[in-house]
């Protein structure tokens, strides 16, 4: 469908967590050609795209509260299994599909979609990418995403790394397209607030043990006591029982219950952008919130207290000028970011952010203008990865050729009341096991 027609483009976004839903929906909004401000409607200006959201059922399916906090709206939004989604894609004529999933989910969908679209004369353009900083499993995650029409890289640095991986294994790297994180924005930092506000951006899985998380919480509380004139906020991603992209076994909320918290210390939820509106110093271990903060030119610190290590993800910020410790912060240190490093991360604090999605938008427009797109061709096939691919597909009830396996969840009807209750109970049991039972078993194993 050429972007010049008045018929609105139809976009589908499949996501498996609150953060990936946010990334997928905002990415779609930035890369799909929309109404032109230079062309009058009578001349055939493009109509506003229609966005349908699909939430892949699993351990991190977002709750209504999490969806409301993300603040991204869609024309429709519903929960599906992988097989249900594939059958929808076989029926519905979408123009663009954004796969906002973990690598294994993307790979399964690429094979499933290749199967359901094999007899169709045309198919949607398929887009995928990463929700934030890529600091682990680079080759694994990239090869699982190979086969999409566009594999989005959130920075110049990522684009170079992505192409090097694909070229290195003999895979086509032409799908790699440089963009930026779609949720950057907000008003630039103009000076200190009253009161001066320090925000610690917590992460669900970094660090991953009680000792380190307790240490970080204690230092944050100590900073609040040392600076009673400041407001110190612990920005949390989820409430106990909710899951995000990563599993959180030791929520800071529970660790904080044992402490006598000072009056200038608070736990907060909500949209990160709104919290940054009142932030004077953003502190984190390695959260993507650091890039949001740097984009606004808010003083930003990536902690070194637990070391600069790949397992923490803060090694990604080597060269940024943002690495510092709590001792330095307690003494009044304010970091100065390295401008060259910031520019390579797709942050666009220099004003270049507005053009960061132009290349992707142009590629999507060309794909939409095509009469038909070639079949999807993932790097992994039953011939190239016979010991790896079948297991990935089976987790989504798909056979080696992408066909739904016998006994896959029903796809031709909405779940009834009993089925909905069973699903909620099963999800609740899983979360209880992750947050309560698993840590106990782990501690017993360490005795």
Image (cartoon, rainbow, N blue to C red):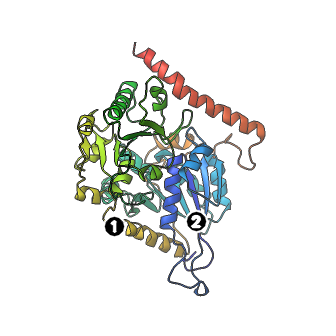
Disc number lying in front (2 or 1): 1
Q: Tell me what residue is drawn at x 24 percent, y 48 percent.
A: 335
- The image shows residue 276 at horizontal and vertical percentages of 41, 51
Pointer 2 residue: 123
Q: Is mark 2 on a helix, strand or loop?
A: loop
Residue at which label 1 appears = 351
Quarter of the N terminus within the rendering? bottom right
Q: Is residue 182 left or right of residue 95?
A: left
Is residue 155 in view from this perspective? yes
Depth check: give the residue in front, 136 or 378: 136
Disc 2 from disc 1: Cα separation: 36 Å
- Res 343 quadrant in image: bottom left
Instruction: Give the image location of residue 312, x and y in percent.
Output: 33, 37
Relative to 230, say whether 26 is above or below.
below
> What secondary structure is found at the residue carrying circle 1?
loop
- Residue found at x 37% / y 31%: 221
**Where residue 311 sits: x, y (%)?**
33, 36
């Amino acid at each position: 469908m050429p972007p010049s027609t008045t018929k609105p483009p139809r976009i589908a976004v499949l996501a498996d967590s609150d953060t990936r839903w946010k990334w997928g929906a905002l990415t779609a909004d930035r890369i799909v050609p929309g109404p032109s401000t230079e062309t009058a409607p009578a001349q055939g200006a493009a109509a506003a795209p229609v966005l349908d959201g699909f939430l892949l059922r699993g351990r991190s399916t977002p709750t209504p509260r999490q969806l409301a906090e993300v603040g991204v709206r869609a024309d429709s939004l519903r929960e599906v299994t992988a097989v249900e989604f594939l059958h929808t894609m076989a029926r519905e004529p979408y123009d663009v599909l954004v796969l906002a999933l973990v690598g294994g989910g993307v790979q399964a969908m690429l094979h499933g979609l290749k199967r359901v679209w094999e007899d169709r004369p045309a198919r949607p353009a398929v887009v995928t990418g990463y929700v934030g900083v890529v600091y682990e499993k680079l080759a694994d995650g990239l090869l699982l995403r190979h086969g999409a029409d566009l594999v989005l890289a959130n920075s110049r640095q990522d684009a170079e790394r992505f192409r090097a991986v694909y070229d290195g294994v003999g895979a086509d790297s032409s799908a790699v397209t440089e963009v930026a994180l779609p949720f950057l924005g907000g008003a630039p930092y103009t000076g200190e607030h009253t009161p001066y506000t320090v925000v610690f951006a917590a992460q669900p899985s970094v660090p991953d043990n009680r000792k380190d998380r307790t240490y970080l919480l204690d230092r944050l509380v100590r900073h609040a006591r040392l600076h009673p004139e400041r407001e110190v906020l612990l920005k949390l991603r989820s409430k106990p029982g909710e899951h995000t992209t990563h599993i959180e076994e030791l929520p800071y909320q529970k660790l904080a219950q044992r402490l006598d918290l000072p009056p200038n210390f608070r736990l907060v939820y909500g949209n990160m952008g709104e919290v940054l509106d009142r932030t004077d110093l953003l502190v984190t271990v390695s959260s993507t919130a650091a890039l949001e903060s740097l984009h606004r030119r808010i003083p930003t610190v990536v902690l070194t207290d637990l070391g600069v290590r790949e397992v923490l993800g803060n090694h990604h910020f080597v060269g940024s000028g943002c690495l510092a410790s709590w001792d330095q912060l307690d003494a009044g240190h304010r970091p100065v970011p390295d401008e060259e490093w910031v520019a390579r991360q797709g942050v666009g604090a220099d004003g270049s952010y507005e053009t960061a999605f132009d290349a992707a938008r142009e590629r999507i427009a060309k794909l939409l203008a095509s009469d038909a797109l070639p079949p999807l061709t993932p790097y992994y096939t039953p011939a190239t990865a016979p010991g790896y691919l079948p297991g990935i597909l089976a987790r989504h009830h798909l056979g080696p050729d992408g066909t739904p396996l016998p006994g896959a969840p029903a796809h031709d009807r909405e779940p009834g009341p009993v089925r909905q209750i069973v699903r909620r109970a099963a999800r609740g049991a899983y979360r209880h096991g992750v947050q309560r039972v698993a840590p106990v078993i782990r501690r017993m194993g360490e005795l």
